[in-house]
Amino acid sequence: MAEKKEQIGVVSLSEYAHVADEQYEFSVSTLCNLGCAFFDHQSAPHRHNFYTIYWIKKGELTHTIDTVTHVVKRNTLFFLAPGQVHQLKLSEKVDGYMIAFHDSLMCPSDQSDMASVRKGLFVNDAFSSVIHLSDPDDEKELEWMVQRMMREIEGKAPGYAVAFQNLLQYFLIVASRHTTTPVAVIPEYQAKHNSALFMNFKTLIEEKYKELKNVSEYAALLHIKPVLLNEISKSLSGITAGEHIRNRVILEAQRYLYNTDLTAKEIAYKLGFEDPHYFSRFFKKYTNQSPSEFKELARV
């Protein structure tokens, strides 16, 4: 009998980069240089505690992000946020780049312009972006940046971390221009203030969705009224704060249903539901499928 899958593994950046330093903040490499152990590890569903960009330059693979499987084309960029569940199934001819980094290198301030870029690439409603590069000039420019990042890390000249950060931010800005909806930088103070509040709200959801399920609880933590939080959420994302909370809970439930052998009852307790029957009703109300129906259809 096969062993029951109950957990989704979490990989740290130091493990990913094969270094002992727990404070390791960034890494960049060609996929070929990562070695066989890296490719073996990718075949099992897992999470990262850091941001990851994969740039597939050539080869064939499928990439499952949460419960959606993408068939990769040449020159495809994947942007993964911490906590997402993913797995790669690669051919022997795959090559490209992997860039990995902690949040501090991308967005020092929630009110910075880079916060808007992060929202567009990593913290969107789909919780990921898949971008196909079609402009040869952009491809050349991005490749130069990645090569320069690798040179900075290898050389470790004075100020190399700052140089890497600036190259990374430029890379993200250029890549963001290829998203379906280009990231807009809005100069007005109120817009920046609301954007910062919304980003804080999304961060709180990531931290507390298992224990807090109501808009009023998040609004209290942000020191604003629930109606205002809903208005800000609606204006910046098109959906209410309550929908963001529900979507995050459902996404995590789907991750467990898709990637583990846990029962709906076990998943309900993991997600903070005291009544497993209420969890099943909640899941079906917002997905039109029971947990068991979702599991059965997802694995076909």
Image (cartoon, helix red, strand yellow):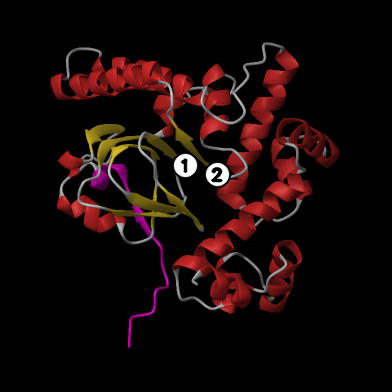
Q: Horizontal and vertical percent for residue 15?
A: 24, 47
Chain part drawn in magenta: 1-16
Q: Which quarter of the image is occupied by the N terminus?
A: bottom left
Q: CA distance from mark 2 to mark 1?
A: 7 Å
Q: Horizontal and vertical percent for residue 229?
A: 78, 37
Q: Residue at x 75, y 37 (%)?
A: 238
* Residue, disc 1: 81
Q: Is residue 58 above or below residue 1?
A: above
The reply to whether dot 2 and dot 1 touch (C-beta < 8 Å) is yes
Q: Is residue 205 above or below residue 159?
A: below
Q: Residue at x 38, y 53 (%)?
A: 62
Q: Horizontal and vertical percent for residue 248?
A: 62, 53
The numbered dot on residue 127 is 2
Q: Quadrant of residue 168?
A: top left
> Could you say whether the residue bearing mark 2 is in a helix, strand or loop?
loop
Q: Residue at x 22, y 35 (%)?
A: 30
Q: Residue at x 55, y 76 (%)?
A: 296
Q: Horizontal and vertical percent for residue 292?
A: 60, 77
